[in-house]
Amino acid sequence: MKVDAPVDTLDALETRDPQERERDLMARLPQLIERARSAPGWARILQGVDSAAIDSRAALATLPITRKADLKALQTAARPFGGLAVTPVGELARVYVSPGPIFDPEGRGQDWWRFARPMYAAGVRAGGLLQNCFSYHFTPAAFMVEGGAARIGCAVIPAGAGQTEMQVQAIADLRPDTYVGTPSFLRIIIEKAREMGADISSMQHALMGAEALPESLRAWFRDNGVPHVFQTYASADIGSMAYETATGGVLNPGMMLDEDVLLEIVRPGSGEPVAPGDIGEIVVTLFNADYPLIRFATGDMSALLVDAPPSRCGRTNMRIRGWLGRADQTTKVRAMFVHPSQVNNIVRRHPGILKARLVVTGRMANDVMTLHCEVDGAPDAAQAAAIVESIREVTKLRGEVRFESPGTLADDGKVIEDLRDYT
């Protein structure tokens, strides 16, 4: 394959012949199924399955789907991981608590979340310094970055989220070359640096995750001193799934799949794969010895990038078009998932609410979350304040409340409605 620039990848796995990669994945699949069945949850889900017979994509497609949306119920029935983890809790490195709550394990292997690949593609190199602005509190994103940095051999400023003036001062004093975190927080940092008159020009690279990155916001970053902006697609249960690459400073189309992920695109609500190039729900089979996931439906929509020339970066894996929406009503707001069950929890706390819908609006990564509540009678300020406090307690996010007359909200089954402007 001819590329326009010297191939520079994390390792040789990324440039394998696609047929070699496919043969390797299919050869590993039966062992993955057999290992997963040693966990009680997978033993139940995969009951009667002949592990040795699951050696092709067609055979894999006969197995049941396990949905991310079902994790809370599975984990409530069997703490902490729903019987889906092979490694005992005491032998893990960390246990995380994501909103829901959902519990996520981390094993002890090097770069356990496989985050070195997106970081390397974004320009992180040995001997560099990055500012890690993902939260270190309860959720794993910051530790994904730590694991990737350790594999690459670069130093990390464990900045976390918040304390914007300190963030700016650290960049101005320590001169990191890379920001890793959410798009919205980088914008806040840049605006604060401008207000303070601080020089943060050392930060030329950014790896974004956990929120949508509209092209208008990417262009804003370029116009404001961060020319190399990359997006990664990861989750707290799977880790890195796909990431952007560039050649000669120009982004390549699509997002490159991780080497330990077997991806299917299926028709939402079913396990049936769609035709290549069609939009559907992302389903992942993850080759992870501690926490194997078999046909795990993420709830995210995407499509395979087909009829496109090989990526000029030299990587040969399949590519997806990126995040194209949600297959269910679970919605990410300011880097945190909000579940319909959380909205129902809020409603149960306030008997005066007849019906409710959480509406998310805003643009350019400035999300506004408003709970529209049908109530009978005249609401008062105390009731509004109590509901706002419940929103914060249940979702860990700030939200507003708007009262509606009975019968105002549409009778369409929606609990969460995403009306954000992604243009």
Image (tube, helix red, strand yellow):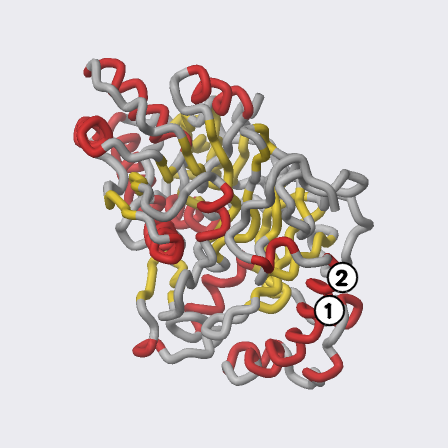
The quarter of the picture where the C terminus appears is top right
Q: Who is closer to the viewer here, 43 or 132? A: 132
On the question of residue 140 being in view, the answer is no
Q: Which mark is residue 409?
A: none
Helix, strand or loop at label 1? It is helix
Residue 282 at x, y percent in the picture:
64, 52
Q: How many marks?
A: 2
Q: Which residue is mark 1?
A: 23
Q: What is the spatial separation of the Cα atoms under label 1 and label 2, in whole angstroms?
A: 6 Å
Identify residue type, mark 1: Arg
Placement of 19 over or under 320, stated as above or below: below
Q: Identify the residue at horizontal 69%, vertical 40% (top origin).
A: 3
Q: Quadrant of residue 326?
A: top right
Q: Identify the residue at horizontal 47%, vertical 31% (top origin).
A: 229
405 to the left or right of 4 = left
Identify residue type, mark 2: Gln
Q: Identify the residue at horizontal 47%, vertical 48% (top origin).
A: 339
Q: Which residue is mark 2?
A: 19
Placement of 251 over or under 295, stated as above or below: above
Placement of 40 over or under 254, stated as above or below: below
On the question of residue 359 being in view, the answer is yes
Marks 1 and 2 in Cβ contact (< 8 Å): yes
Please, which residue is most extreme toward the front here?
A: 6
Q: Who is closer to the viewer here, 183 or 370? A: 183
Helix, strand or loop at label 2? It is helix
Q: Who is closer to the viewer here, 12 or 103? A: 12
Placement of 298 over or under 252, stated as above or below: below
Q: Identify the residue at horizontal 44%, vertical 73% (top origin).
A: 77
